[in-house]
Image (spheres, rainbow, N blue to C red):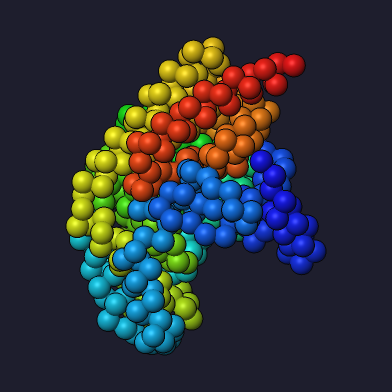
Amino acid sequence: MLLNKSEFLFNRAQQFIPGGVNSPARAFKSVGGIPVFFKKAKGSIITDEDGNEFIDYVGSWGPMILGHAYPPVVKAVQDASFNSTSFGAPTEIEIQMAELVQRMVPNIEKVRMVNSGTEACMSAVRVARGYTGKEKIIKFEGNYHGHGDAFLIKAGSGALTLGQPSSPGVTKGTAKDTLNADYNDLTSVEKLLKKNKDNVAAIILEPVAGNMGCIPPEPGFLEGLRKLCDEHETVLIFDEVMTGFRLARGGAQERFDVWADLVTFGKIIGGGLPVGAFGGKEEIMNVVAPVGPVYQAGTLSGNPLAMSAGLAQLGALEKHPEIYVELEEKTEYLQKRLRLLLYEHEIDFDMHRVGSMVSIFFTSESVKDFKTANTTDQEFFRVFFHEMLKRGIYLPPSPFESWFLGNSLTYEMLDKTIAAADEALGVTKLKVNE
Ligand SMILES: *Cc1c(COP(=O)(O)O)cnc(C)c1O
């Protein structure tokens, strides 16, 4: 398949935009080749600038849980835009959004809207620090919480893909307040809490890791963190930017029945528009300005187009909980068949699925944290990715990203994907062993 126009556009983009992209995970760095430039999409079919069609397993990295150009979202945005695209003053739709979030995630007593997942996580940590008067935070190696300085120390996602989990430009002063523990390892957390007694404001984590591939929490891990936070008067922050409204209406909290003090959202909450949010216990949220002294603000926060899109998408998810059942059945269908193929082709792998998030790790290790995730055969993934792309399947262009399924996927599309994977795995095995 020729990607002529993408190649042309990528060359042009690189002259004016760093690396030709506005976010590094898009640049195909870890798979090589030319990133595909897209023109339009409907449901789970995305069309590139050359008119090639692909079945989409990226879903804009999560937001498109109901498919692209979902009619109620499109209509909501159109309708809202006629009444102005921004006021910078309160609107009723912001209340509707806050009420809806609380109905779906009952421990969100108060919520503040922001413009991205990054902003949500940065703000949640500031709030936790303001509330506790403590300075340090504990995060987990390979988890990603956006590009706030405090998080760019052993981070996942694009940072991991580029092989620079820690970024230049983050000062030593900032880095010293971020402590890294090992995912699924409570002992590593206990050690840090002991060593930094009475100075850990928050533990922040992805309750299901999705930015070093999909890695579920082992039984007892989330419960153990909850208990440690209670003992140490530390704020437990679940970063549900990826998992929120995806793993259940109430996200990972509902799915695992472990409830955090603060929760961050992004991706699905905006229906594809730039939205993030953080919320939780009223007592903690009351430190946020203008009620309390912890400053947090945004000219476009609660923007009417963004709120309309989010409200339309979350509204559909609230009204139709069967979507979660259907989506899980589809993902399981795909997972089971891929698993069989991998056995048939005698390829070493580990595979994780939680709800509609799924990842293949090409490794003989059992993957449960950053270290084991890193044993995945990146060269194998690189070849596999392009063999799938050639066959019309658009996977996340990195071995360290979860696939995100949307409910617009049909069983016919899943079967097509499985047939493509059968061929692609065979070809990849030959090519890599050459
Ligand atoms: C995507 C993501 C973020 C960052 O959100 P942006 O909207 O890209 O700033 C934070 N945390 C997690 C878990 C994410 O997956």
Q: Which residue is at the far right?
A: 15
Q: How many marks?
A: 0
Q: Nearer the viewer, residue 201 or 311?
A: 311
Residue 146 falls left or right of residue 70: right
Position in image of residue 113 (x %, y %): 39, 70
Residue 23 falls left or right of residue 168: left
Position in image of residue 323 (x %, y %): 26, 47
Residue at position x 40%, y 81% from top? 81
Residue at position x 58%, y 48% from top? 52
Location of residue 132 with respect to 348 vertically, above or below: below
Residue at position x 35%, y 57% from top? 262
The quadrant in which the N terminus is found is: top right
Q: Is residue 324 visible?
A: yes
Asked where in the image residue 286 lies, by quadrant, the reply is: bottom left
The quadrant in which the C terminus is found is: top right
Residue at position x 34%, y 79% from top? 79
Q: Is residue 259 visible?
A: no
Position in image of residue 197 (x %, y %): 46, 46
Q: Nearer the viewer, residue 6 or 286?
A: 6
Q: Nearer the viewer, residue 10 or 204?
A: 10
Residue 169 falls left or right of residue 142: right
Position in image of residue 70 (x %, y %): 36, 60
